[in-house]
Amino acid sequence: MHSKLIYVIFATVLLIAGILVAIFLAESVPNGAGLAHAQFNGMRVGGNGVARLEHIGTLAFAFQALLLLLIVCLAALGVAEERRSKGFWAYMGGTLLFSLFVWWQMYSNHQAFLETGVTSYFMGFPVATAWQVYGTWLAAIPLIVLYSVGFRKFIFTDEDEEKFEQLLEQIAKKSEQ
Amino acid sequence: MEAYRQEIIIGAVIIYMVFCIFTGLWAMRRTKNSSDFFVAGRGLGPVVVSLALFSSTLSGFGFVGGPGLVYSIGVSSFWMIVISSTGYALGFFLVAKRIRMIADVRNCISLPDVLAARYNSEAVRFLIAVTIVLGVMGYLATQILAMAVVMQAILSGTAMFADIGLVTCVVVSSAVLIFYCVTGGIIASVYTDVVQGAIMMIAGVLILLTAMSVFDGGMQEATSIILADDGEAMMPFGAAGIMASLGWFFVFGLGLAGQPHLVTKMMMNRSISDNRIILPMSLFGYVMAALLWVSIGVIMRAAVIDGVIEPLALPDDAASFFLSIFTNPLLAGIVFAGLFAAIMSTSDAFLNIGAAAIIHDIPKAIRGKSIQNELFWARVVTVILAVVAASFALYSHFQDATLVAILGAFGWATFAASIFPVLAIGLNWKGATALGAIAAIVSALLINFIVQLSGIVLPYGILGGLVAFIVSLSLFIGVSLVTKKPELDADMQAVLNI
């Protein structure tokens, strides 16, 4: 079961590990993980955003893109192989594309802010942050919908329930004997 | 009403604690055996499980540490919240169905029970049980300390209790926690969780509304003040940077399905089909409660930068200062009760799984059977665990913070790295082997321990927990692929086929 998918998951994890190693080896910058605020104790600032992403921006983008792929593959692993139809994969592919789109919008809007220093706002947050707050959260909603609405089709069918009841009956009979 | 602020807050907290005590007494009558004590006889309805699940996820860290993190590092910490939809989805896709099935088939009462059955390995049971005990001590100590500090802050504002000591507050708050956990076990825990969850949701929404009225321009004015001070703090990766943010996304997102106090609750529902309702309900509750985290953090950082209020002595003061400055006393009372609810709902879950590991799993792994009269010993060990954790908390506060800090390393990230691969992938891949599981658990524990003890600072804010997680995932799959495919027992084979 799941023979091919586990290899895809394994390859994705190894690629993520490889990117992490590359980030470890990349030239570091003083504000890579932030700096103390000059005025307020306990507060930290990011400082020069361009410098922070100069050596690792592309690697970090790829890291997250692979993580989104990993999430979709792991969710698919939770669905029995025989129910992973073409329609199922199309849906999961769409979910992945949606997640990648949100990630791209967040990243590119952040880049645009770094270049221009100006941003518009959406529902209380700068646009790039709004993609993070609302977009990232919404990006997994298709998975929730598939689980809740498609529960009887993909997760636990009537046939599954019947098989499980039979298994419990067999175990009960054995223990009586 | 303002003149009675402290009295109203204390009243709300006392009402909540009295409720917990009565729930413990009520649940005691329904707790007949260890299965009732640890997994509520697997008979809980979807609303109860949903509320218990999300309220246990959002501990005192979410109500105190969360706003403090936004105050300190800006948007970086939002990643821990926005990942909730992915985290819950993966937890249900990968764990909810099969953990419930294995619990039924093998009459399991704990997570190590389930994993021992899956891998047919007492070594896996032992390692997971030890991981849980170590993690529980760290979590419990910090939660009890947080509870006592908040109680002291509330009571010291009144004339009668102005000089109350921290030790007294630890004793009082732990006594309430111990009472309802010992008398009613997990039944008391989950039913108090229901009320705790409801209070947390109400608190989250009311705080958001209050926060939006602090600045005339609402949330947008607050975020633009932060942006003008430091653009990065209000951009998606915050002050902590892109790798810290994405690391949290990874560890909190995937890691939710590896948290023992959460996945154990997936064993307690009456019917597997209820999972389709539990998932969206848990997520909804979590999001409502987490509004507090975002809104208090943003408003307090903006208010300090804008000179509306004085800078905070500590970032973790953000929530209590917000409540004392910007909210009316009734709302402050509800939120403080919600804060105790958040801390207690996580603590009771940890007490429960810790007791199960000690009296059920470790003896079973070592001598092949659990101890006699499990229900009695579960109650005794629950008391001992809470007392030891409270002692750790006080020792840490007054003498040396190292001990709790080390145990604290066995927090979310260690559970995520050591349990997620073994449980979430292992329940869905027949090729997973006991050797792969052992390699994953040991590597996760070692890496987290080494990073914590050596104080290594990784470049670009990369988390030690992220490294541990990726290594354990790689080892789990890699070692399983190269070791002999296990022969599963017939019932496990049948469960993994469904």
Image: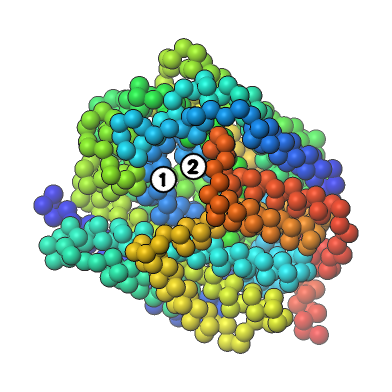
**Label 2: how many residues lie within 10 Å, few (<14), some (14-19) or many (20+)?**
many
Q: Which mark lies nearer to you, 1 or 2? A: 1
Q: Quadrant of residue B29?
A: bottom left
Amino acid type, label 2: Ile
Badge 1 or badge 2: first in the primary sequence = 1
Going by the numbered disc 1, the residue's amino acid type is Gly
* Pointers 1 and 2 within a single chain: yes
Give the numbered dot on residue B395: none
Q: Residue at x 17, y 53 (%)?
A: B5
Q: State the residue at coordinates (57%, 40%).
A: B458
Foreground residue among B414 and B28: B414
What is the chain identity of the residue bearing mark 1?
A: B
Task: Determine the secondary structure under disc 2.
Answer: helix
Residue A132 in the figure: left or right of residue B272? left
- Between residues B157 and B277, which one lies in front from this camera angle? B157
Task: Determine whether B120 is above or below B234 in the image.
Answer: below
- Give coordinates of residue B181: x percent, y percent: 44, 73
Residue under numbered circle 1 = B66
Q: Chain of mark 2?
A: B
**Residue at 13% over, 55% down:** B4
Residue identified by numbered label 2:
B81
Residue A50 is at least partly visible in this image: yes
Cβ–Cβ below 8 Å for labels 1 and 2?
yes
